[in-house]
Amino acid sequence: MAMAAATAAVSVASRRCLLSRTSVAGRPAVPAALRGPDGTRGLLPGVLQRFSTATAAEEPISPPVQVNYTKLLINGNFVDSASGKTFPTLDPRTGEVIAHVAEGDAEDINRAVAAARKAFDEGPWPKMTAYERSRILLRFADLIEKHNDELAALETWDNGKPYEQAAHIEVPMVARLMRYYAGWADKIHGLIVPADGPHHVQVLHEPIGVAGQIIPWNFPLLMFAWKVGPALACGNTIVLKTAEQTPLSALYISKLLHEAGLPEGVVNVVSGFGPTAGAALAGHMDVDKLAARSNLKPVTLELGGKSPFVIMDDADVDQAVELAHFALFFNQGQCCCAGSRTFVHERVYDEFVEKAKARALKRVVGDPFRKGVEQGPQIDDEQFKKILRYIRSGVDSGATLVTGGDRLGDKGFYIQPTIFSDVQDGMKIAQEEIFGPVQSILKFKDLNEVIKRANASHYGLAAGVFTKDLDTANTLTRALKVGTVWVNCFDIFDAGIPFGGYKQSGIGREKGIDSLKNYLQVKAVVTPLKNAAWL
């Protein structure tokens, strides 16, 4: 997604939310959400908060969409779980139940895998011409655009992300991705390889079979597209498990896929929990691709990150502040590649911190269905409390709490945009993935130092570089041990750009031509030649 489009979609005339904090020896007071009843530091959910905005205090807007699909999608039909059990999916604005969704477990995974296996071994999908598969994906993209507003509303309702972000950035990107993979479907081909003798050698690229896919909750529709698109373009069948926090949009969009002409059994969707449905899918002996367990199936993993965002001393500080703010706070900070370690050169550090604080105080937090809101609630109570624990850790470890640090309001899972300065590399907030609206700003002196510190992480998903100097940019892009480096931009996610990480940030790549390799087998076919006119 282009930076300009993202900024336009989520930035509006913002309102300032000011707080006069008392302090001791220049240090901010401990936020109310981090103090216990006796005044000591400790989580105290529900305490009266001192930060508020009009958007957060108003009654939640009624979502402009109905929930029509809550059952499992198996073999082209929506069905109850084998056990008959359901689980609630919650509105993160309030914590209230949106709907009860069928809870799949091992028996349901067995049913879905059997349907996918039959569709691959006996059905029309893998035997269909690549051009016809392409046409189905193109029709699917048209339907996504037709139902853009409903998909965006479900995504916002179930996830909490701003509706403007979902409607104007994410759902259009899903349609774009499907057209991208539709274009690849009839361009996957093999090779003829010369041999050292009278043999004809073909190298074939064949679909891998039944692909098991598990998608996360932070970008449910986009992750659906990242995984389903290339798998279908290559002729595979799929069993997909949704995140238990956000099952609704995947069920809706899968219905559209079948409306586009997808044969039954090709895509099966099971909602459920990781220890039951997820584990059953990962270990299933009849799934050809997912995880290295049971039958040594190949694995593709896009995991977490602790991405450095390096701001050099030649930077335009105002521009750097805005880009670093976007890099961290976009999607409530719930991005694997978020620029969560903001390294700022010592010459511009103090100016940057003050301006970053001012920008955070302008950020509009509230009901994500309300026009102009930049930040909605976190996904659920578990993540909400986890983020507040990290904030407490930052305070306890000696980092300076510049702004934020509390929950916002007394309903839902809203957290104030939070900034720490004077952050040291050994602190938890600088080492671990917070996955929330918490910016850690670190100071550095020179290029060699920041390269060493930026690479001193178990993660290696992405990085940002902000500089006017081409030599500096080239040095950093080659030195940083990450899968993506954005120079003077961030979160550019075009369909053809591969995405994935080094080290503990994953295995393999999503998007682009490299993603097709995840869903293809390579086969060599050798036949002898007799009286060949040429070799």
Image (cartoon, helix red, strand yellow):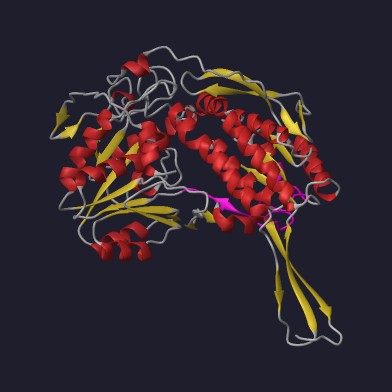
Residue name at image x 46 percent, y 45 percent: 336
Q: Is residue 281 magenta?
A: yes
- The part of the chain drawn in magenta is 279-304
Q: Is residue 391 left or right of residue 18?
A: right
> What type of secondary structure mainly makes up the magenta span?
loop
Q: Is residue 363 magenta?
A: no
Q: Is residue 508 visible?
A: no
Q: Quadrant of the N terminus?
A: top left
Front-most of residues 95 and 323: 323
Q: Quadrant of the C terminus?
A: bottom right
Q: Residue furthest top?
A: 59
What x and y, as percent, mark residue 375? 38, 29
Q: Residue furthest left?
A: 25
What x and y, as percent, mark residue 177? 56, 45
**Does 520 appear above or below 384?**
below
What x and y, as percent, mark residue 59? 42, 12
**Does 435 appear above or below 80?**
below
What x and y, as percent, mark residue 202? 75, 72
Front-most of residues 92 and 1: 1
Residue name at image x 60 percent, y 45 percent: 179
**Does 360 appear above or below 453?**
above
